[in-house]
Image (tube, rainbow, N blue to C red):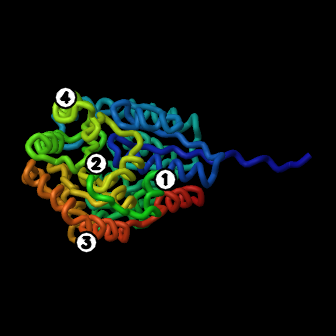
Amino acid sequence: MSNHQEKPPLSVVIAGGGTGGHVYPALAIAQALKQKSPHTKIYFIGSPKGLEARVIPEAGFPLKLISIGRFNRNVALKERIKTFFQIPWAVVSSLVFLLKVRPSIVFGVGGYVSAPPLIAAILLRKKVFIWEPNAFPGMVNRRLAPFVTKVLFVMDGALKYMKSKRVQKVGVPVRQEIEALFREDYKPRIPPLHFFVFGGSQGAHAINKAIVECFQQYPLESVKLIHQTGQKDYDWVLESYKELDPQQERLKCFAFVKDMDEKYRWSHLVMCRSGIGSVFEILATGRPAILVPYPYAADNHQQKNAEELEAKGAAWVLLEKDLSPEKIFEFLDQCIKKPDSLVNLSLKAKTLYKQKAADEIAQMILSS
């Protein structure tokens, strides 16, 4: 009989979430881990209010939910006080969970919900990695950077805010089914122009309003539209499009889109916010984009993301203060008349994309 005991499978906890910019890169890392090491056990910790509450279970991964509110300066004092009293319980709940699943490493992807499990992991002296995609890091990552095993950053500007010498530059993980489009040629056959509009997991009211008014005011028979509205605006947007296109053959809207890869593949032109997740999906798919930065993002980081792409000839930028039916029509009309401008944007976007970031990060985790 052999005296060698079989080594237990690696266990990884991925903590964080809230919006697609946190959730989808986390999912891409989990998928890469499973591909490289099928026996690795992967658990997520997130919020019942975040996008992860729906997306992670649908992807087949176990999810531990903890309740904690936001605690930045943009929220009301009452909510911050409530969150202050939630933190100890959330940390204890995370401690109990980590003691149960005994992870080899805890990986933070940002978002306020990542704080309690990361604090718990530090207290248990676990290996802790945090990933920061933005030029101005989120508060949780800024505060915890000195205490973690390794800081993975994307934008060089983040380093001056992250007090750690244990740093490594990486890319932004993009879901495998979306990154697959990197290898496909972009060959738009226009007309009709396929226009895909989305405002992120929550939708974007300013974009929704301007797009609907554009199609109401201008004859855009040579444009086919798919519009992801978010739940709040879905009903009135749907009714507006039914009046213009009763059979919904040309103008389609959805509260939420699950098959983003197919929507990107279908599209010739995209309009969206410029959060880091959307930006890197655009680069990965090589889709020409009109970026409308969210004007209230922390330290205006969305506008910084968008302007960097525009400066490199990889996207167009339309600030929300300038957003109007007239401006949107001008863009669409230009794309129909000069489709070569779309091809040029697509080629430039792909030159800025770093492939296989999820694989690189997964390998770091497995080798740690």
Marks 4 and 3, the one that precedes in the sequence: 4
The amino acid type, in three-letter code, at marker 2 is Phe
Q: Position of residue 100 (x, y in %)?
A: 57, 34
Q: Splitting the image into 4 quarters, where does residue 258 fall?
A: top left
Q: Nearer the viewer, mark 2 or mark 1?
A: 2
Residue bearing the label numbered 1:
176
- Measure how far apart labels 2 and 1 are at the Cα level: 20 Å
Q: Is residue 183 above or below residue 251?
A: below
Q: Splitting the image into 4 quarters, where does residue 250 fall?
A: top left
How many residues crowd mark 3 within 10 Å: few (<14), some (14–19), many (20+)?
few
Q: Nearer the viewer, mark 4 or mark 1?
A: 4
- Measure how far apart labels 4 and 3 are at the Cα level: 39 Å
The amino acid type, in three-letter code, at marker 3 is Lys
- Measure how far apart labels 4 and 2 are at the Cα level: 19 Å
218 and 259: which is toward the camera:
218
Marks 2 and 1, the one that precedes in the sequence: 1
Q: Report helix, strand or loop for mark 4.
A: helix
Q: Nearer the viewer, mark 2 or mark 3?
A: 2
- Identify the disc placed on residue 308: none
Marks 2 and 3, the one that precedes in the sequence: 2
State which quarter of the image contains the C terminus: bottom right
Residue most toward the right?
1
Q: Report helix, strand or loop for mark 1.
A: helix
Residue bearing the label numbered 3:
312
